[in-house]
Amino acid sequence: MARTKVKAHMRKVVPFAWERTLFVTCAATAVLTLMHLWQPMPQTVWQVPPPYDLLVVCVAVLAFGLFFSSTFAVDHFDMFGLRQAFSGADEHTYRRPGLVLNVYYSFVRHPLYLGLLMFLFCAPTMSAGRLLFALLNLGFVLWSLPLEEGDLEAAMGPAYAHYRRSVPALIPSLRPYKQAEAMMRKNM
């Protein structure tokens, strides 16, 4: 539902102001349904022995912290479609958020995905069910990234194209991306 072509078809039925809110509601409903219908697969795939298990838990907590705090880089009203819904704007007058370049996004393009995947895979005791869920999420991320980035590049133009070429998608860079410096080097 987040793809541009799907949104174009949705607008025949759903007003622009409500498309993002509908998407978020459907995504949340899908996740809740998945959680409700999920059947346990308790077989142990791996178990990290003490004291290393605490290290894995610490990495998982840091990963969840990255995931959660990354959401604050983006305006939550925009993320959940509330600004779009309550403004009543149409697609031609609505001002979309621009390129976000806070501390996380200057090292990796998708800190939300990175934090989520790290959290899912960092388990001192990995059950078959959790591993399956983590692998399904990894598959979804790898499938959706090119689609999402194509839409972002089409919407934001050369600024995002340069950012995309300069900052890795999921494995953080050791040096931060600085938009002003990058654009100056490009113009030289």
Image (cartoon, rainbow, N blue to C red):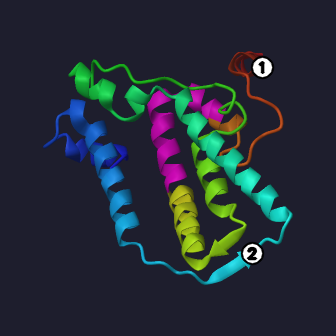
Residue 185, disc: 1
Q: Quadrant of the C terminus?
A: top right
Q: Nearer the viewer, residue 108 or 6?
A: 108
Q: Marks 2 and 1: CB-CB under 8 Å?
A: no
Which mark sits nearer the N-terminus, 2 or 1? 2
Mark 2, residue position: 47
Q: Nearer the viewer, residue 163 or 135?
A: 135
Q: Quadrant of residue 91?
A: top left
For the record, the magenta segment spans 144-163
Relative vertical location of residue 104 with respect to residue 181 in this rendering, above or below:
below
Give percent across and percent down for residue 184: 74, 15
Instruction: Kindly identify the amino acid type of the residue bearing the numbered disc 1.
Output: Arg
**Extreme-front residue of the structure:** 50
Circle 2 Cα neighbour tier, 10 Å, few/some/many (<14 / 14–19 / ≥20) = few
Q: Does residue 112 appear left or right of residue 90 in this picture?
A: right
Q: Does residue 126 appear left or right of residue 81 in this picture?
A: right
SS label for mark 2 = strand
Instruction: Kindly identify the amino acid type of the residue bearing the numbered disc 2.
Output: Gln
- Which secondary structure class fits the magenta region best? helix
158 magenta-colored: yes
Q: Quadrant of residue 23?
A: top left
Relative vertical location of residue 112 with respect to residue 86 in this rendering, above or below:
below
